[in-house]
Image (spheres, grey):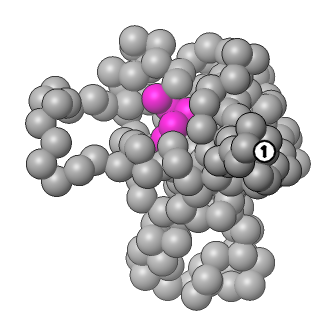
């Protein structure tokens, strides 16, 4: 796997006698890249190379759009969701925010930190919740947040646990 100059990733299979053995569709490349990025971002138990704890606020203040994008790629891979981008002019907690405002992510990394903060992962049909329950994972300053889009949640505390579990790991 390698990063393309225009953003995104390229995935290459082994060659045989100087020729390609197999090629991958764009959607399969995206899935392979997402899984690889998620695996690479997973901390190892004895990894002492990153002694300082990075918070989301550190990444935002340092303009680290690439690490914030990796967070979303990891959650997309874990949940089977899809990365979407919110419009610039509507805050996540604005009362007019609707799912229909989201756009599919462009086929590259975020252009800057402002765009990275508008990325989210949308997960549909969360197991063990109502059939039409959908969730969203996004970053709001220091912490990733999770929100329910639709569906009825009766026992809020237990359903929040189900949502959190089924929306994947929320750690950096």
Residue wearing tag 1 = 20
- The tally of labels here is 1
In the displayed structure, 141 sits above or below 160; it is: above
Residue at 65 percent of width and 47 percent of height: 14
Q: Quadrant of the C terminus?
A: top left
Left or right: residue 104 compared with residue 54: right
Which residue is more in the foreground, 47 or 13?
A: 13
Left or right: residue 73 compared with residue 12: left
Residue at 75 percent of width and 17 percent of height: 6
Which residue is more in the foreground, 14 or 67?
A: 14
Residue at 60 percent of width and 48 percent of height: 34
Residue 127 sits inside the magenta stretch: no
Question: From which residue to which does the magenta span run?
Answer: 67-71
Which residue is more in the foreground, 83 or 29?
A: 29
Q: Quadrant of residue 136?
A: bottom right
Locate residue 133, reporting x and y percent: 70, 74
Residue 69 sits inside the magenta stretch: yes
Locate residue 111, reporting x and y percent: 68, 15
Q: Quadrant of residue 56?
A: top left
Q: Is residue 138 visible?
A: no
Left or right: residue 135 compared with residue 155: right
């Amino acid at each position: 796997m390698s990063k393309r100059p225009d953003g995104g990733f390229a995935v290459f299979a082994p060659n045989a006698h100087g020729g390609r053995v197999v090629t991958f569709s764009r959607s399969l490349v995206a899935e392979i890249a997402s899984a690889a990025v998620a695996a690479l971002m997973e901390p190892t138990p004895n990894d002492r190379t990153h002694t300082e704890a990075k918070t989301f606020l550190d990444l935002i203040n340092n303009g680290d759009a690439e690490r914030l994008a990796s967070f979303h790629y990891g959650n997309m891979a874990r949940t089977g969701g899809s990365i979407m981008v919110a419009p610039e002019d509507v805050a996540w907690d604005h009362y007019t925010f609707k799912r229909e405002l989201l756009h599919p992510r462009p086929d590259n990394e975020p252009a800057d930190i402002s765009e990275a903060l508008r990325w989210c992962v949308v997960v549909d049909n969360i197991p063990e919740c109502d059939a039409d329950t959908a969730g969203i994972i996004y970053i709001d300053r220091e912490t990733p947040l999770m929100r329910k889009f639709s569906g009825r949640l009766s026992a809020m505390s237990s359903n929040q646990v189900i949502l959190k579990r089924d929306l994947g790991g929320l750690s950096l």
